Image: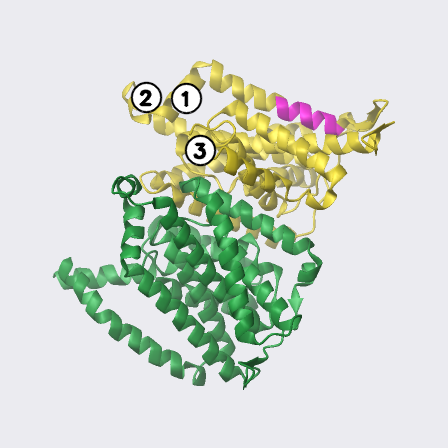
Chain colours: A green, B yellow
Amino acid sequence: MNNTNSMFARAMPLLLGALFVIGLVAPFAVYPTFLMKILCFGLFACAFNLLLGFVGLLSFGHAAFLGTAGYICGMLVRDAGVTPEVGIVGGTLAAGALGWVFGVLAIRRTGIYFAMITLALSQMVYFIVLQWKATGGEDGLQGVPRGHLFGVIDLSNNLAMYYLVFAVFCIGFAIIYRTIHSPFGQILKAIRENEPRAISLGYDVAKFKLLAFVLSASLAGLAGATKTLVFQLASLTDVHWHMSGEVVLMTLLGGLGTILGPLVGAATIVSLQSELADTVGSWVTVIMGVIFVICVLLFRRGIVGELQALIQRAGIR
Amino acid sequence: MEIFGVPSALLGSQLLVGLINGSFYAVLSLGLAIIFGLLNIINFAHGAQYMMGAFVAWIALTKFGVNYWVALLLSPLIIGAVGVVLERTMLRKLYKLDHLYGLLLTFGLALIFEGLFRDQYGISGQSYPVPDLLQGGVNLGFMFLPIYRGWVVVAALTVCFGTWFIIEKTKLGAYLRAGTENPQIVQALGINVPLLITFTYGFGVALAAFAGVLAAPIYQVSPLMGSNLIIVVFAVVVIGGMGSIMGSILTGLGLGLIEGLTRVFYPEASAVVVFVIMVLVLLVRPAGLFGKA
């Protein structure tokens, strides 16, 4: 077990390096907008996984962070006329602040109640976005300009936009990777495994949970703000509870609590949706539901989790 | 006649709407609480099962000419049976795992049900006529009361208190409460706990379907009718806490009334008032009004 674990630890930098190179050359082989969508949702799912996979908190309201950041970024860039990087930072901070509010309320309860509270709070955000005039109501925020990064680089060029999204993803991913492998991350895992024991060891569990929640919300916001620039649109679907469910599905399918799982899950779901949208129409929801049920009943380790288990078994033999 | 500067007819009719919504909250949160008590899972499919209950009644009427009264009995039986099958084939496999998997599984099921009905019937609502016996209304002097709406409140409350009676006062209810406390010991005493669990889930689901049939003549019967409602019901459950049957009923009714009042005095907030109350309760009494800490 230890041997294979250290094998993973050794192989990980190599794997990440290879993925980084693939990320650099990918836009020359695949449609950049499609890749940007995968990276945005990948970061969103990684941020979600930080909470569910490493602290054991199931948030059913993460769409609120993705969507709020998207709307704030869109309003900043379109209506206040700031440069895109300011818009992204503004959106991320807004999501972090909202995450603090959600966190303070939700960590008062655990388990299933935690999930229900986050879901209810995000539904409240949905109604506010729906009714507030500045967000465009049912039309959403349309025609957000991509603008010039730092006032210099023109982002209407798809390739320039791609490398910005790629950089944002790498920064977000690095923050998550660093967090998981820090002493802070170890305490989070201890809370996941045995909360009463973590408390008895003298850790202020509520504080750690809140920190993790704010971090996860901010990163989800980072993904949302970037996504708004990519598609030049912030819409109600981003704050709807379906989106909260989708990120759970991406994470579960890719592999809960694995480092690369959420990205794999996001890539799978995004590809599946764009494939299916043309062929089966409204059956997409049904298929998502079926994948959910299969994942929960038969495939709880997810794609990456199963692969790791496979390699581990081979290693033991 | 005016009360706080609001015409009494307006106040009365909004309070009635609030009471009706509250009745639905009560029946649905009661079902969730019963299921949670024994199975330890939150039934995310509850909203979808409520929707299916309404659809079964609508299909029975339009395709087979089955009237409202028969549907009121038949639909909960059919949907409850579907629930029994789901419990036997899927939910049962998850009891040893983290409770969150139950939530995720039922979420997936909700997506499947909703998607199937949306594919078949679209998102526009179907209307279900008010049964002949309950048509018309009575003038109460200060407001006009449509008879069907009065009936919904009476029927919902009857079912709620009937359920309360079964659980608190009968032998079967005693088994159920004991099973909630400690299933191993109840099993050791020779009671078939797995069967009890199956029927508890079926009963909770049947309650949702019953609410769906009651709702059919009031709201449009549409595939999405359950999904927004269920999130409000989750907030109701957080506010009340799932520890007490009577607590679920009272919280549901109370919140419906508060929502109705909000619609009179500050309509913009009526969609979020339940969530705001949830926030306040979490700050003051995190375990919920009737919850055990």
Quadrant position of the N terminus of chain A in the picture: bottom left
Q: Callout 1 environment at 10 Å: few (<14), some (14 to 19), or many (20+)?
A: some
Q: Is residue B149 magenta-colored? A: yes
Q: Residue B93 location in percent, x, y?
A: 34, 41
Kindly state the secondary structure of the residue where label 2 is placed. helix
Kind of residue at disc 2: Val
Mark 2 falls within which chain? B
Residue A266: where, in percent of width, then height? 43, 65
Residue A49 in sight from this viewpoint: yes
Prevalent SS, magenta region: helix
Picture quarter containing residue A133? bottom right
Q: Is residue B216 left or right of residue A114?
A: right
Range of magenta residues: B148-157
- Letter of the chain that mark 1 sits on in the rendering: B
Quarter of the image for residue B259 reads: top right
Q: Position of residue B264 (x, y in %)?
A: 76, 37
Quick one: A18 or B159, which is closer to the camera? A18
Mark 3 sits on what residue? B36
The chain that hosts pointer 3 is B
Give the residue number, with chain letter if any, for mark 1.
Answer: B177
* Residue depicted at x 41% and y 81%: A26
Kind of residue indicated by mark 1: Arg
Task: Choose between B61 and A280: the one closer to the eye.
Answer: A280
Which of the two labelled residues, at mark 1 and mark 2, occupies the earlier sequence position? 1
Measuring 48% from the left and 66% from the top, which residue is drawn there?
Answer: A223
Residue B100 is a magenta residue: no
Read off the residue under disc 2. Answer: B186
